[in-house]
Image: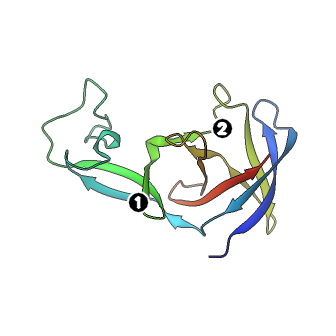
Amino acid sequence: MKPKYLEVDTIDNNNQSVIGYAYFTRLTSWKDVRHIDVTKRHSLFESATDGNGYTSHDKEFNTNQKKYYLDYVEYKKYKIPLSSCANMFNNFYFPFVYRYSENGEIHYIHSFDMDDYFNPLYFEFSEDGERYRVYEKTRG
């Protein structure tokens, strides 16, 4: 896919007003969120959940399972667990989200990869959360 450059509104999470503009490059078309079963030897095991939804960091985590469940997105073979994608609609932690209009529809770039603080990838998820697009912030 050819990268698409977008000028987007920066929206205040508290009152939904436009507070500025930012520029992004869309790097992918719509892709499906991946769901796989992993073992304790998998590189992303710490982000996987047991049958009750607990991760290895929770004291209720079931250590006796053979397989654990992992949801992730992928970009250029880089697997990013959904648990590493910060939801920017949480106005306690993030004061704003990014919004743009395309083909008469409103879209939000509202998540980013918390594992890469200095040059994170950004994500737009579909309303059902099963599809995503990847973005890179170019300025703003």
Q: Position of residue 26 (x, y in %)?
A: 67, 63
Q: Position of residue 136 (x, y in %)?
A: 65, 55
The image shows residue 93 at horizontal and vertical percentages of 63, 27
Q: What residue did someone put label 2 on?
A: 89
Density class for disc 1 (Cα within 10 Å; few <14, some 14-19, many ≥20) is some
Q: Nearer the viewer, residue 96 or 139?
A: 139
Q: Nearer the viewer, residue 105 or 132?
A: 132
Q: Residue at x 64, y 57 (%)?
A: 135
**Residue 27, placed above or below residue 7:** below
- At label 1, the amino acid type is Arg
Q: Where 31 sits versus 123, above or below?
A: below
Q: Residue at x 19, y 48 (%)?
A: 41
Q: In the structure shown, which secondary structural element does the residue marked by tag 2 occupy?
A: loop
Q: Position of residue 65 (x, y in %)?
A: 15, 42
Of the 4 image quadrants, the one containing the N terminus is: bottom right
Which residue type does callout 2 highlight? Phe
Q: Residues within 10 Å of mark 2 (few under 14, many from 20)?
A: some
Label disc, if present, on residue 34 of the rendered structure: 1
The quadrant holding residue 23 is bottom right
Residue sitting at the far bottom: 1
* Secondary-structure class at tag 1: strand
Q: CA distance from mark 1 to mark 2?
A: 22 Å
Mark 1 touching mark 2, by CB under 8 A? no
81 relative position to 102: left or right = left
In the image, is residue 49 above or below residue 67? above
Judge left or right: residue 66 versus residue 117. left
Q: At 25% from the left edge and 42% from the top edge, which residue is drawn?
A: 51
